[in-house]
Image (cartoon, rainbow, N blue to C red):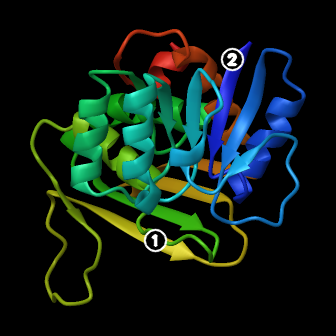
Amino acid sequence: MTKIIMHGCNGKMGQTISRIVAVDETAEIVAGVDPFDGIQNKYPVFSNIKDCDVEADVVIDFSSAAALDDLMAYCREKKMGLVLCTTGLSEQQIAAAQELSEEVPVLRSANMSLGINLLEKLLVEATKTLSQAGFDIEIVEKHHNLKKDAPSGTALALADAVSEGLSEEYEYVYDRSKRLEQRPKKEIGISAVRGGTIVGDHDVIFAGEDEVITFSHRAYSKAVFGKGAVQAAKFIADKANGMYTMSDVIG
């Protein structure tokens, strides 16, 4: 039985994961952490991770970048694995997570869905062929109007997968409104759309002469991310120290 602390338990993803684990016979949420109350959970909830005194195997984090520093300190002190799902992290926090992985197992992914992680692998191979053929590369991501960071962590991860397939370095471009010039060849345009209740749409567009190839992923429910996070928690619960990704989980 994998014992989990749900960090950000009263958020939408925290509640989604709580429902998934409630019917999972091989995992249990033994405590939650969230500064916001008003939700009845079947496990004890602490307003700050520092106050949590419940023994567990791993923490799943779907909170905010502001709460990450205390969480990493807690995992270091308790020698507890961490599934890090929060996006919008600073370069310093990403570096700190890498350092933490030298002491505990850490799994970090911008997107926990099986489909997105398989797409990343496909993009590496597709880019090797299409970039050599002169295709322009654009990424468009769409999310609900409550999402604060832009572009999404998933869009950046997809751009990184594309970059892995390139033979030379391309620039990531987020805004073209202040320039008046033809599109340079060595750039990847990344656009963000925010509106309504869109769970998560990502399109990677390879635009060539007289043809366009688009790789698309649509998430219709947050459950796809929650299931992946639970799989990841089970995976790293007994793993050696190190930095892992969802690619390690899906094999």
Left or right of 133 in this view: 155: right
Residue at (71, 77) in percent of width and height: 196
Above or below residue 154? Residue 199 is below
Q: Quadrant of the N terminus?
A: top right
Please state which of residues 134 and 50 is positioned toward the viewer in this rendering: 50
Instruction: Classify mark 1: helix, strand or loop.
Output: strand
How many marks on residues? 2
Identified by mark 2, the residue type is: Thr
Q: Position of residue 168 (x, y in %)?
A: 9, 41
Q: Mark 1: few, some, or many residues within 10 Å (few <14, many ≥20)?
A: some
Residue at (46, 26) in percent of width and height: 78
Q: Mark 2: few, some, or many residues within 10 Å (few <14, many ≥20)?
A: some
Left or right of 233 in this view: 18: right
Left or right of 133 in this view: 48: right
Left or right of 127 in this view: 185: left
Q: Which mark is residue 47?
A: none
Above or below residue 242? Residue 188 is below
Q: Which residue is mark 2?
A: 2
Is residue 173 visible in this depiction of the protein?
A: yes
Residue at (42, 62) in percent of width and height: 66
- In the image, farthest residue toward the left: 168
Instruction: Classify mark 2: helix, strand or loop.
Output: strand
Distance Cα–Cα, label 2 vs label 1 = 37 Å
- Indicate the quadrant where residue 38 lies: bottom right
Residue at (63, 52) in percent of width and height: 8
- Indicate the quadrant where residue 163 lies: top left
Q: Position of residue 93 (x, y in %)?
A: 29, 50
Is residue 128 visible in this depiction of the protein?
A: no
Please state which of residues 4 and 13 is positioned toward the viewer in this rendering: 4
Q: Which residue is mark 1?
A: 192
